[in-house]
Image (cartoon, rainbow, N blue to C red):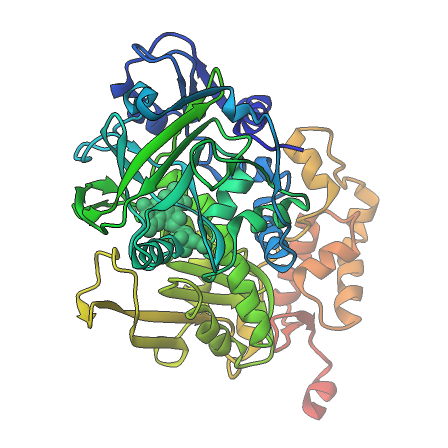
Amino acid sequence: MSVSLRDHLDVLARHGDLLTVDAPVDLRYVSAVIARSPRAVLFNRLADYDLRAVGGVLSTRDRLAWAFGMPYPEICHRVQKGMDAPVEPALVADAPVRQVVRRGEEVDLTVLPIIVFNETDGGPFISSGVTVARDPELGFNAGFYRMMLRNRQTLSIAPGYRTSLAEFYRRAMARGEPLEVSVSIGTHPIDSMAAATFLPLGRSELHLAGGMRGRPLELSPGVTVGVPALAHAEIVIEGVMPPVGWTVQEGKFPEFHGYVTGVLHNPILEVRAVTHRRDAMLHSLQMPMEDLWITGPPLEANAWQALRRAGITARAVYATPGGCCAFHVVAAIEGPPGAGRRALESLLEVGIVKHAIVTDADIDVYESEQVEWAIATRFQADRDLVVLTRRPGKGIDPSIMIWEEGRPLTAKIGLDATLGADVPRSRYERIVYPYHHDPVVETILRDGPVPVPVDAATQEGAGVRVEAQLRGGSRYFVEVLRALPDVPYRAVAATVARLDEEGRLDRDGEGRLRMRGTPEEVLRS
Ligand SMILES: Cc1cc2nc3c(=O)[nH]c(=O)nc-3n(C[C@H](O)[C@H](O)[C@H](O)COP(=O)(O)O)c2cc1C
Ligand SMILES: [Mn+2]
């Protein structure tokens, strides 16, 4: 079973999706190389640094699918499984991440290859740290919170105000105590996804990771703090957040929504120890692409749950990358007329979803052009649009202009692109190309020998046989062709043309061909 980032790199290498750079690279180029590389990148040597760097390991849907060993759309069900059946983590001795231990005055963060990601960053940033904390009443918590390098033994950390970590910190401050944390850098994508999952206060992402794997997440006891770290991480930073609050300037930094956020005030993290594998690599987790695919499936899991609670049968749910895998969700549903609106109302309550779309089950929600097509052809704005105003929003959404009592307010919309109950289904006849799945078509595409009806005798009898077909009842042109596989197309077309010229051809209300009746029959009908 894959437990480490290295295991994941092996998987990427097997898929030809890892570029290994052995020449020494200056850290200033690492961000751009990761951004421009079509593959994940492992920098085996860095000029002036002993440790290695790696990036892009989470940048595509495929990379996540390979990490989980399942198609991407199924990952959300694995998250759900972890939520339903969490597994207690296990402490292990002699974790690889403790091969090198520096504590106290030996700590020097500047030996770590921490990169600058973006032109206007406030400094070098650690973006890939899974921060573990413990609260006496609430237990463990784990999440990602970016950290900016300040000096040899100090980082700042960005817990926001509404995360569980922010609440743990406020509680520690109320006790007048520092909050101890461990920061595990370079984790397996399953553990990273667990840490990126929003769980209610008091529920532990470490237990979620165990539940997602069906076996305990292995932790290593802290060497200077009372909180453990992920045993199979590359690097662990231990430290405390002194009980002084959000006091230091921090940022700017690129955010998950694809923009650079401004300078904030954030807490300090005083570092007590750094431990790492002997040949450790620092994961330069690049925003936004490496953030998206670990935040989508947890959101999709919550969306499935919300739809189930609303009594809706869903076929597929996708948090789309264009919607930052957070603001947009598309669901293909089955259900009675009216289910679309109910589905939208549920989806717009999930996470920070702002725009939701529901389609019928025949739409592939992973193909944005199909979703757009459903909107183009099944949606009427005055009938199928749900608009909500003044809902709780996400503070860093740059479009939000309304704040009330310090809370950002957002508008939301839902688009019901399912077939309207009152619209005739006959308007939605799908195009089917004749002989689409016929083996002959394959043969033509392969440029192999194709059977052609050429028998002169059958051609001679063709007119009679086509007429017999049309006398047998109404037939689409293609139905006549299919009934007479040995008759050349041109003979069928010529017969139909002749019958038309002779005034003997008729058409029914569906456009099928038939023979015109005798004058008596016509009068009777
Ligand atoms: C790569 C990555 C970086 C993140 N950086 C931050 C951050 O700097 N500050 C923040 O508040 N949330 C950040 N998040 C989101 C939190 O990790 C996420 O909201 C998590 O659910 C919070 O967990 P908590 O409520 O248990 O503290 C980040 C998520 C990812 C995947
Ligand atoms: Mn949490």
Rendered location of residue 348, percent (x, y): 41, 70
Rendered location of residue 77, percent (x, y): 61, 54
The quadrant holding residue 349 is: bottom left
The quadrant holding residue 126 is: top left
Vertical comparison of 496 with 94: above or below:
below
Is the C terminus in the top left, top right, bottom left or bottom right quadrant? Answer: bottom right
Q: Residue furthest front?
A: 176
Q: Residue at x 32, y 47 (%)?
A: 178
Which quadrant of the figure shows ligand 2? bottom left
Q: Which residue occupies the foreground of this view, 336 or 209? A: 209
Q: Residue at x 38, y 7 (%)?
A: 23
Vertical comparison of 26 with 395: above or below:
above
The quadrant holding residue 431 is: bottom right
Rendered location of residue 188, percent (x, y): 53, 35
In this orientation, does residue 325 appear?
no
Tell me how many marks there are: 0
Q: Residue at x 49, y 41 (%)?
A: 192
Left or right position of 480 against 278: right
Q: Residue at x 52, y 53 (%)?
A: 204
Left or right position of 504 against 407: right
Rendered location of residue 440, percent (x, y): 72, 40
Q: Residue furthest right?
A: 457
Q: Which residue occupies the foreground of this view, 342 or 163? A: 163
In this orientation, does residue 409 appear?
yes
Q: Residue furthest top?
A: 23
Is the N terminus in the top left, top right, bottom left or bottom right quadrant? Answer: top right
Q: Which residue occupies the foreground of this view, 248 or 128? A: 248
Vertical comparison of 449 with 303: above or below:
above
